[in-house]
Image: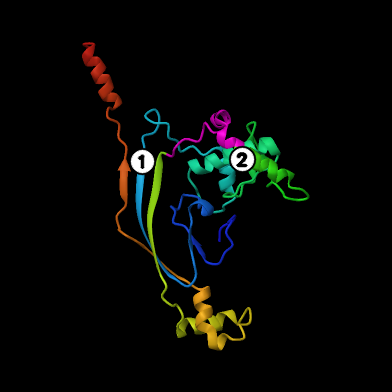
């Protein structure tokens, strides 16, 4: 389970991501409804870009991003432009409202005036003042290009981007069989009582509450795309030397 997650409807939430990529559930996840058999087929590609001075890409993790990642024990996440922009936006909101309103990250610290400070989520109690302020600041930030250029100048594209392309199909095959029925009866009854009409309607309960998800790669190969310089520094120096008769 990941937090925060805005969606509380029945079903399964799943996301495919690289091990060094923070899972952004609410913006990149798939949602699977019960009563279906779902098939998710994926392919993976990795794009590597030239580092400065050839491009403006970056792998640098700032202090605010590092503070965010430190909350996830035992993992080493890499720089993310999406995360950087979210931290940038929340910094803007905090400067306006003294609270944050992030829906995709559990942010506890922000870098304000070059200092990491603890921040709190905007509250709806006892009034909606904080939330209304955050909502207004969020909208203003979208159109405030000057603030974006000042606060988000470090949010450049990653030098390596891993992309998963997914195809999903679903069918309404019934999942109710005697094996699953027995498993449910042996496990659920340890914690709660089964419905009174379970004996006669167990197939309906299973189809309304369970799903099957099959995940498999479309290919065992990973597609790599690598950017290369058209001229190396040696080529440049040789060209200059040749033209100047050195």
Task: Point out which mark residue 48 bears.
Answer: 1
Classify 10 Å Cα crowding around label 2: few (below 14), some (14-19), many (20 and above). some
Q: Which residues are magenta?
A: 140-158
**Rendered image quadrant of residue 213:** bottom left
Q: Which residue is mark 2?
A: 138
Given the current orientation, which residue lies at the most extreme right position? 126
Mark 2 residue element: helix
Percent across and percent down for residue 22 are 50, 50
Q: Which quadrant is the N terminus positioned in?
A: bottom right
Residue drawn at point x = 57 percent, y = 53 percent: 73
- Indicate whether residue 187 is drawn in magenta: no
- Residue 174 higher or lower than 229, as above or below: below
Percent across and percent down for residue 132 are 69, 43
Mark 1 residue element: strand
- Residue 12 higher or lower than 236, as above or below: below
Relative to residue 178, is residue 244 drawn left or right?
Answer: left
Residue drawn at point x = 72 percent, y = 50 percent: 124
* Residue 81 appears in the figure: yes
Residue drawn at point x = 44 percent, y = 37 percent: 157
- Residue 7 higher or lower than 35, as above or below: above
Relative to residue 100, is residue 149 drawn left or right?
Answer: left
Q: CA distance from mark 1 to mark 2?
A: 32 Å
Relative to residue 119, is residue 229 drawn left or right?
Answer: left
Percent across and percent down for residue 77 are 49, 48
- Indicate whether residue 157 is drawn in magenta: yes
Residue drawn at point x = 49 percent, y = 76 percent: 207
Query: Of 142 and 161, which appears nearest the observer?
Result: 142
Query: Of 9 and 90, which appears nearest the observer?
Result: 9
């Amino acid at each position: 389970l990941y937090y925060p997650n805005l969606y509380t409807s029945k079903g399964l939430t799943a996301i495919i991501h690289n091990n060094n990529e923070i899972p952004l559930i609410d913006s990149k996840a798939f949602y699977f409804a019960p009563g279906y058999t779902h098939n998710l087929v994926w392919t993976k590609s990795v794009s590597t870009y030239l580092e400065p001075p050839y491009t403006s890409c970056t792998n640098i993790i700032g202090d605010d991003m590092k503070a965010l990642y430190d909350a996830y024990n035992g993992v080493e996440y890499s720089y993310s432009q999406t995360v950087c922009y979210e931290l940038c936006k929340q910094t803007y909101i905090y400067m306006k409202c003294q609270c944050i309103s992030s829906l995709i990250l559990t942010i506890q610290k922000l870098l304000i005036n070059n200092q990491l400070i603890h921040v709190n989520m905007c509250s709806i109690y006892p009034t909606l003042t904080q939330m209304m302020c955050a909502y207004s600041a969020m909208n203003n930030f979208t159109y405030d290009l000057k603030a974006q250029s000042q606060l988000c100048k470090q949010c450049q594209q990653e030098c390596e981007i891993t992309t998963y392309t997914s195809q999903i199909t679903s069918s309404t095959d019934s999942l109710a069989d005697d094996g699953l029925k027995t498993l449910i009866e042996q496990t659920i009854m340890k914690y709660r009582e089964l419905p009174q009409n379970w004996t006669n309607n167990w197939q309906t309960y299973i189809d309304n509450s369970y799903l099957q998800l099959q995940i498999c790669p479309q290919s065992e190969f990973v597609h790599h795309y690598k950017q290369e310089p058209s001229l190396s520094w040696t080529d440049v120096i040789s060209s200059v030397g040749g033209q100047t008769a050195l």
